Amino acid sequence: MSQVSQDIFSSLVGDGAAMRQVKTLIQQVAQTDATVLILGESGTGKELVAQALHDLSERSGRAFVPINCGAIPAELLESELFGHEKGAFTGAITARKGRFEMAEKGSIFLDEIGDMPLPMQVKLLRVLQERTYERVGGNKSFQCDIRVIAATHRNLEDSIEAGEFREDLFYRLNVFPIEMPSLRERPEDIESLLTFLLQKIQDMGRKVPTLTEKALIALQHYPWPGNVRELGNLVERLSILFPGLTVDYEHLPKKYQVPLPDGAQLIKPVKCPEISTPVTSEERGGQGELSLLKRG
């Protein structure tokens, strides 16, 4: 992998088989204009994948424009995506560019696409098919030359069955799917994720804790419903409570003090010289005292 790729992947932390596969897929598709659908639970880092896809593409010098389709009221989403003309609706005192126009020649990231209302799905499908759109309240057509990346935490095939997502839009988006693994599916990456997150705090001039091996093993056995986002919150909490101190199993918040199987050992990623090397099996094991970061 080139130095440029390594720099871009620096936020996609993890050397286990699951993350190596994600990085391989990103490298394979980034240089194309294929539409990518990123799947995965909330908090797994889907926007980091989208950003890496843009940064490794030929559009990297242009804008990367994210929009959370589930966070914007349905009545405002069309204007947010495609812009509006002056007087298009009450409060539209000036014309405004939409996210598609801002992303021209670059990439647009449609986060939580599974939460997009059905009427808006029809309009998005037309844009993806015809590569043209109009601002709300306008009749001028704008040409659309952008890379479309979408993401969702939902099972869109279930949403199709429930009548909540258009099947034709799903197939238009699902050209090249990338599945982001949950944190509980890659416990071997927790050690490197902790190091990365603690280093970010240390870079701000703050003291950080050192976790014992037993504390780390406990975190590797915790199910992480909030994924990497939850891990980040825990690291922040521990850094406030134990600056420059050692954190053992009993110092962890109660819910992270999970029962450990007899002889539980630290799970390590299988070493692999290149992320593109196929991995057919994963042997986990290894032990030894671990100090994530020296006390700040």
Image (cartoon, rainbow, N blue to C red):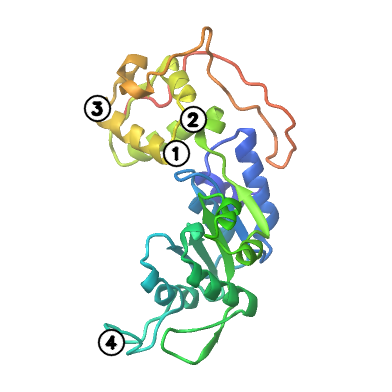
User: Which residue in the protein does label 4 denote?
Assistant: 93
Disc 4 versus disc 1: distance between alpha carbons?
Answer: 42 Å
Disc 1 versus disc 3: distance between alpha carbons?
Answer: 20 Å
User: Which residue in the protein does label 2 denote?
Assistant: 190
Q: Which of 51 and 177 is in front in this view?
A: 177
Of callouts 2 and 4, the N-terminal one: 4
Residue 241 image label = 3
Of callouts 4 and 3, the N-terminal one: 4
Are the residues at dot 1 and dot 2 in contact (C-beta closer than 8 Å)?
no
Disc 1 is placed on an element classified as helix
Q: Residues within 10 Å of mark 2 (few under 14, many from 20)?
A: many
Residue type at tag 4:
Ile
Disc 4 versus disc 3: distance between alpha carbons?
Answer: 50 Å
Of callouts 4 and 1, the N-terminal one: 4
Q: Residues within 10 Å of mark 1 (few under 14, many from 20)?
A: many
Disc 2 versus disc 4: distance between alpha carbons?
Answer: 50 Å
